[in-house]
């Protein structure tokens, strides 16, 4: 629409043209247009589509459609997200092409120092907002093989961000549930009530034990600030967080600041089992406690559990001292070899993927 210059107006122009009226009384007079100020003002106001929305907060796009770059797209989504706007509003921008969306998906995969990616887009930064918007707009069946692999990585990275925020919320919830009535706590943190796990059990519809494990995992992550930062950025996923948690089992928390910078380098690209082994080796090397002290503390955590399975099967699990555990394993192995000789071999795999 055109620009109207009101007498006395001193405001700057906007995307919709110069302001129609500078509300000061002395900026308008009937003499300016021969005494028809009211009628002319009413006509102009009726022709202004943004009269009720001067800042155009509810306008998705103003002006002709055009193709925008991935850099502009990422910047606008970040601006909308930071200003309290809706990324969903931005998804209706005309001219937003699949190529720009694919560039954001590719940007979710960080460059590996030893194997830089040639097609990583320069200047495009992945954020949870841009990642979610790209995943929403792109359909997997429209992507090439390489872009589909990047899509998987982008989805995994966004999931890691959400899981990290969930862990932050769990840890904050735990701080709000101190022990009551001098209860004896069975969780990792004696400063957290057992009833906290009970509340989470109802929220997640899970067992109390599983809820307590979630609180314990959140407490461990809270003691690893750099790990938590990478988790929130999606550079560590849930699988590697679990690997770190397994590696730090029975390790004193005051040793965490020593170990974290040693195991965190390259952790996002490590095999999870290898990451766990690396942390355990580092803990063995840097732990000032004697092996006897560590053994006695760990032996308190020994446990055996039985889980019924369908079709007359069951799962038996145990955490035991190494010597009796090895004797039990060798006995089971003898039974398995005998089953092979009897023509009843197993075709299943162990939890690590090896033949049983």
Image (cartoon, grey):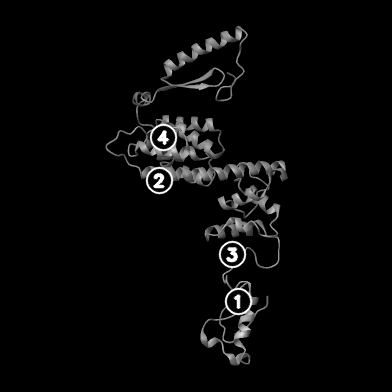
Q: Which tag is nearer the camera, tag 3 or tag 1?
A: 3
> Which of pointers 4 and 3 lies earlier in the amino acid sequence?
3
Which mark, residue 172?
Answer: 2
Number of marks in the rendered image: 4
Residue 324 spot, x, y in % from top left:
42, 15
Q: Residue furthest top?
A: 342
Residue 343 spot, x, y in % from top left:
63, 8
Q: Taking 142 as reference, is 282 left or right?
A: left
Q: Which tag is nearer the camera, tag 2 or tag 3?
A: 3
Name the residue beneath numbered marker 4: 212
Residue 108 spot, x, y in % from top left:
60, 47
Helix, strand or loop under label 3: loop
Q: Is residue 254 visible?
A: no
Helix, strand or loop under label 2: helix
> Which of pointers 4 and 1 lies earlier in the amino acid sequence?
1
Give the Cα distance between marks 2 and 3: 35 Å
Q: Label 1 crowding class (10 Å Cα cut-off): few <14, some 14-19, many 20+?
A: few
Q: Taking 16 as reference, is 335 left or right?
A: left
Q: Which tag is nearer the camera, tag 4 or tag 1?
A: 4
Name the residue beneath numbered marker 3: 58
Residue drawn at (57%, 8%), measured in percent from left and top? 338
């Amino acid at each position: 629409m055109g620009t109207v210059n009101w007498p006395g107006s001193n405001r700057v122009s906007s995307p919709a043209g110069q302001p129609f009226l500078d509300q000061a009384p002395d900026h308008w007079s009937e003499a300016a247009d021969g005494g028809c100020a009211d009628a002319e003002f009413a006509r102009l106001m009726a022709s202004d589509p943004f009269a009720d929305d001067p800042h155009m907060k509810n306008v998705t796009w103003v002006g002709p459609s055009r193709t925008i770059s991935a850099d502009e797209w990422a910047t606008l989504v970040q601006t909308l997200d930071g200003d309290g706007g809706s990324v969903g509003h931005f998804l209706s921008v005309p001219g937003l092409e699949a190529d720009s969306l694919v560039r954001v998906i590719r940007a979710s995969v960080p460059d590996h120092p030893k194997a830089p990616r040639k097609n990583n887009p320069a200047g495009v930064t992945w954020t949870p907002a841009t990642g979610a918007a790209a995943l929403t707009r792109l359909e997997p069946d429209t992507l090439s093989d390489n872009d589909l692999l990047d899509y998987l990585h982008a989805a995994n990275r966004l999931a890691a961000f959400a899981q990290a925020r969930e862990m932050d919320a769990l840890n904050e919830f735990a701080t709000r549930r101190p022990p009551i009535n001098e209860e004896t706590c069975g969780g990792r943190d004696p400063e957290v009530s057992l009833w906290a796990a009970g509340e989470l059990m109802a929220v997640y519809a899970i067992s109390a034990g599983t809820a307590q494990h979630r609180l314990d995992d959140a407490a461990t992550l809270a003691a690893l600030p750099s790990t938590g930062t990478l988790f929130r950025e999606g550079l560590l996923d849930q699988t590697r967080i679990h690997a770190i948690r397994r590696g730090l089992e029975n390790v004193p928390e005051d040793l965490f600041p020593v170990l974290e910078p040693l195991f965190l380098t390259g952790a996002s690209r490590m095999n999870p089992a290898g990451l766990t082994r690396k942390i355990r080796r580092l803990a063995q090397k840097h732990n000032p406690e004697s092996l006897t002290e560590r053994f006695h503390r760990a032996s308190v955590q020994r446990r055996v559990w039985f889980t019924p399975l369908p079709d007359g099967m069951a799962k038996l699990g145990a955490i035991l001292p190494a010597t009796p555990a090895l004797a039990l394993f060798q006995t089971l192995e003898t039974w398995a070899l005998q089953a092979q000789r009897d023509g009843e071999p197993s075709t299943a795999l162990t939890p690590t993927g090896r033949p049983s």
